[in-house]
Amino acid sequence: MAPRGLCTLSVVLLWGCVVVSSSSHTTVAPPRDLQITDPGLLGALDVEWKPPPNVQTPSECTVKYKFEYRNTGDTDWKVIFTRKLKFRVGFDLSRTAEVKVQTLLKGRCTNDVEVQSDWIYATFQVPLQGKLESQVQNFHCIYHDWEYLKCTWQPGLPAPPGVHYGLYYWYEGLAQAARCEDYTQDHGMNVGCTLRNLSQAEYRDLNICVNGSAAAAPLRPLYTTLRLQNLAKPSSPRQLVVSMSAAEELHVTWSPPGGQTPPQCLEYEVEMAEDLGEAKPAWQCPEKKTSSYLSSFQSF
Ligand SMILES: *[C@@H]1O[C@H](CO)[C@@H](O)[C@H](O)[C@H]1NC(C)=O
Ligand SMILES: *[C@@H]1O[C@H](CO)[C@@H](O)[C@H](O)[C@H]1NC(C)=O
């Protein structure tokens, strides 16, 4: 009995050994020449690499890449599985861009087990000129009525005399970054800019850079990426008409604000107060109306 049990055990061990060694012998090298280049699109960077050396990919085995990227300081990597050798992805240029790629090999040559190479890494940082405080402050943008984007800012510190700020932007579809032409000024200094005709940029990344030149010292540019649909603000409804019917019903009607805001995105709020000659009428909100065009409601 005892010898037979031992024999079974040794056969199992041997078989296990064969499988482990056959898959662990298959290795794959990482890709080569990982490079990040800046095409000047204010945040979109081009990342490319070359296949591992001497890949004679056995037939029935496929080579793929796992490409991951983030800005330094982010906790998570964004992950892309691909067979391509080049990607354009968005970063925040005020921080270092980090990328890594590894080769993945899978198929009959690996017993259908995915074999991963080591990673290769690359980083990129635009030259950071000027001190951080010299960057413009309180940068805000509103997409008014889905029609025009107005951005405002305050000068960095110390507010340099004779500073000249410019706003540049890019979104997918523009051949290159463009300069805003319509500035708001305060004492001759650009402190805001209005961009129109941005429908192509909706639901995409809109990359922005506000930089400036001053005679005294270089200024730190501000980089940011906007999503227009998150910055939309409608104006007030128009043509408010209040009337009282014979049955003492109060009718309130209005029409939608102008602009291109999609009607399904609009919601109205009605408040009313009785004028009792008090200094401050108490406004009440009797009811909310969604998507209403020429609405009315009954009062009291
Ligand atoms: C609006 O932008 C498009 C490209 O996105 C351009 O072809 C068109 O001429 C622009 N229109 C105006 C009024 O600027
Ligand atoms: C501001 O940024 C734009 C776009 O990158 C660039 O063309 C321009 O030279 C910069 N200006 C200054 C003063 O750095």
Image (cartoon, rainbow, N blue to C red):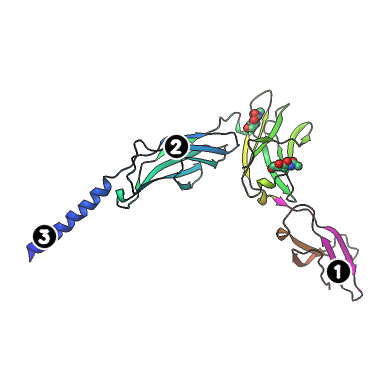
Q: Residue at x 24, y 51 (%)?
A: 20
In which quadrant is the N terminus drawn?
Answer: bottom left
Circle 3 — which element?
A: helix
Identify the mark at residue 7; answer none if there is no mark.
Answer: 3
- Give how far apart the Cα atoms at labels 2 and 1 are: 67 Å
Main SS, magenta region, reads: strand
Label 1 crowding class (10 Å Cα cut-off): few <14, some 14-19, many 20+? some
Amino acid type, mark 1: His
Query: Is 181 placed above or below 149 here?
Result: above
- Give how far apart the Cα atoms at labels 3 and 1 are: 95 Å
Circle 2 — which element?
A: strand
Stretch of the chain drawn in magenta = 232-255
Q: In the picture, residue 138 is in which quadrant?
A: top right
Closer-to-camera residue (173/8): 173
Query: Is 233 placed above or below 180 here?
Result: below
Which residue extends farthest front? 59
Query: In the image, 175: left or right of 182?
Result: left
Q: In the picture, residue 56 is in which quadrant?
A: top left
Q: Residue at x 26, y 45 (%)?
A: 25
User: How far across and down, in percent of the image, does residue 225 sit?
Assistant: 62, 43
Q: Which residue in the protein does label 1 denote?
A: 251
Among the two numbered marks 3 and 2 on one chain, the one whose residue lies closer to the N terminus: 3
Among the two numbered marks 3 and 1 on one chain, the one whose residue lies closer to the N terminus: 3
Query: In the image, 238: left or right of 143?
Result: right
Q: Is residue 195 visible?
A: no
